[in-house]
Image (cartoon, helix red, strand yellow):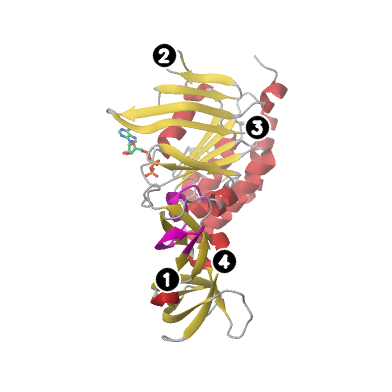
């Protein structure tokens, strides 16, 4: 046995070459994944890509078929050698609809897994977590008297109470309505960071992953496509799939000439791609910046408005851009605030190249 202090410095979770099949159909294909102490890692990806299966393997709810899994340096699963059962892994689990014990009060639910502590310590620990999650006034309430959001807060407190080696959260906020979800996410992240819980969180929502994660592992079809900070994935996507996963994008086709691609909205650099290569130019709607007339911006393109829609915090413009050589392109631009120019109005646009990505046409298909 390692001394607890040493164990804290070990990687909280290490999954190595994990592979898993259901009925001969491989759904997790050789995944390597780590969670450092105190780190929140989000497993992000479209429905059916294998996120939950990976989380269930870490929890011990699925028996590992290939690869290995370690918690704080202790190997807990290796096929044919070892399978530590879920209740012996000391992991905290919370799911979309985590069931609470109906006959126990909120406080008793949270204190339930703390049998090794004295009654006083159990109570103090449960009260502290419930207060941090905004449930101080509900200690004696029973689960059926709570809203869905309150139940989810209690479920999180209950999972956190035994100070697990790893928190495993599977879509914990997805059954909540949008406004409540934002608040609970905020409170949850605050508590996870305060107690320094290493966490693996499954979500299909890119915004949730960007908000919660220190690192995101983006999955597609059983594999991790890219791992990195939210900024790395958003600003330096590895392939078209990563770009499209984070939101709508304008796609144009072009050919590289002297290190650039000519598009109806101007020249775009195509670094490290050979001249003559056919490429896909991916332009995020927020990359199209509207220029006030007469503002001296070095390079810009002309367009006219086809349609403008107010979305609330931003406005969506459908533009028709007119390039040199008569090239035209229909593009979506997203601008902050209320901006509703009339149909046909001419508009000059400028490209924010940090939100434009160029990939050879034969890169991975961009459809999720
Ligand atoms: P979602 O976001 O929809 O929950 P996911 O990314 O979490 O999806 P998984 O639930 O891991 O994906 O499922 C991956 C694939 O494995 C899917 O095709 C699913 O149908 C299949 N699958 C999952 N569990 C089982 C099972 N117990 N038996 C057979 N197939 C399964």
Residue 96 visible (yes or no): yes
Return the disc, 4 or 2, that comes first in the chain's sequence: 2
- Residue bearing the label numbered 4: 352
Quarter of the figure with the N terminus? top right
Mark 1 neighbour density, 10 Å: few (under 14) some (14–19) many (20 or more): many
- Residue 128 drawn above or below residue 79: below
**Residue 278, quarter of the rendered image:** bottom left
How far across and down, in percent of the image, does residue 200 sit? 54, 38
- Residue bearing the label numbered 3: 122
Residue 331: numbered disc: 1
| Image quadrant, ligand 1 | top left
Return the disc, 1 or 4, that comes first in the chain's sequence: 1
Return the disc, 3 or 2, that comes first in the chain's sequence: 2
Residue 80: numbered disc: 2
**Label 2 close to label 1 by CB (< 8 Å):** no
Q: Residue at x 70, y 18 (%)?
A: 3
Mark 4 neighbour density, 10 Å: few (under 14) some (14–19) many (20 or more): few
In front: label 2 or label 1: 1
Foreground of the two, 333 or 359 = 359
Of helix, strand and loop, which one carries label 2? loop
- Residue 60 drawn above or below residue 259: above
Q: Residue at x 41, y 85 (%)?
A: 343
How far across and down, in percent of the image, does residue 348 sit? 52, 80
Return the disc, 3 or 1, that comes first in the chain's sequence: 3
Q: CA distance from mark 3 to mark 1?
A: 59 Å
Return the disc, 3 or 4, that comes first in the chain's sequence: 3
Foreground of the two, 315 or 321 = 321
In this picture, residue 32 sits left or right of residue 124:
left
Of helix, strand and loop, which one carries label 4? loop
Residue 216 visible (yes or no): no
Residue 299: numbered disc: none
Instruction: Check if residue 242 falls in the magenta segment.
Output: yes
């Amino acid at each position: 046995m390692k001394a607890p202090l040493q164990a804290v410095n070990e990687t909280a979770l290490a999954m190595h070459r994990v592979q898993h099949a259901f009925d001969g159909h491989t759904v997790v294909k050789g995944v390597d994944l780590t969670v450092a102490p105190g780190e929140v890692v989000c497993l992000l990806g479209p429905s059916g890509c294998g996120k939950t299966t990976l989380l269930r393997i870490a929890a011990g709810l699925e028996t590992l078929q290939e690869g290995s899994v370690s918690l704080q340096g202790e190997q807990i699963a290796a096929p044919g050698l070892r399978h530590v059962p879920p209740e012996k892994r000391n992991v905290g689990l919370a799911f979309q609809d985590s069931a609470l014990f109906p006959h126990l009060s909120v406080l008793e639910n949270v204190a339930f897994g703390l049998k090794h502590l004295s009654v006083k310590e159990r109570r103090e620990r449960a009260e502290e977590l419930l207060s941090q999650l905004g449930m101080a006034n509900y200690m004696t309430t029973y689960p059926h008297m709570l809203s869905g959001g309150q139940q989810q807060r209690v479920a999180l407190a209950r999972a956190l109470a035994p100070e697990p080696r790893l928190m495993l959260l599977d879509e914990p906020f997805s059954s909540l309505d949008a406004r409540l979800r934002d608040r609970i996410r905020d409170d949850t992240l605050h508590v996870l960071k305060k107690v320094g819980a290493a966490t693996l969180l499954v979500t299909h929502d890119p915004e949730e992953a960007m908000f919660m994660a220190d690192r995101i592992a983006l999955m597609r079809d059983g594999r991790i496509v890219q791992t990195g900070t939210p900024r790395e994935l958003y600003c330096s996507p590895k392939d078209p799939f990563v770009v499209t996963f984070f939101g709508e994008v304008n796609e144009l086709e072009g050919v590289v000439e002297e290190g650039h691609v000519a598009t109806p909205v101007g020249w775009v650099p195509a670094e490290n791609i050979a001249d003559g290569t056919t490429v896909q130019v991916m332009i995020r709607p927020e990359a199209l910046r509207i220029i006030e007339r007469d503002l001296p911006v070095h390079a810009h393109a002309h367009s006219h408005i086809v349609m403008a829609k107010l979305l609330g915090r931003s406005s969506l413009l459908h533009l028709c851009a007119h390039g040199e050589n008569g090239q035209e392109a229909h593009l979506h631009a997203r601008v902050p605030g209320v901006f509703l120019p009339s149909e046909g109005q001419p508009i000059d646009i400028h490209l924010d190249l940090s939100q434009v990505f160029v990939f050879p046409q034969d890169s991975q298909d961009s459809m999720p």
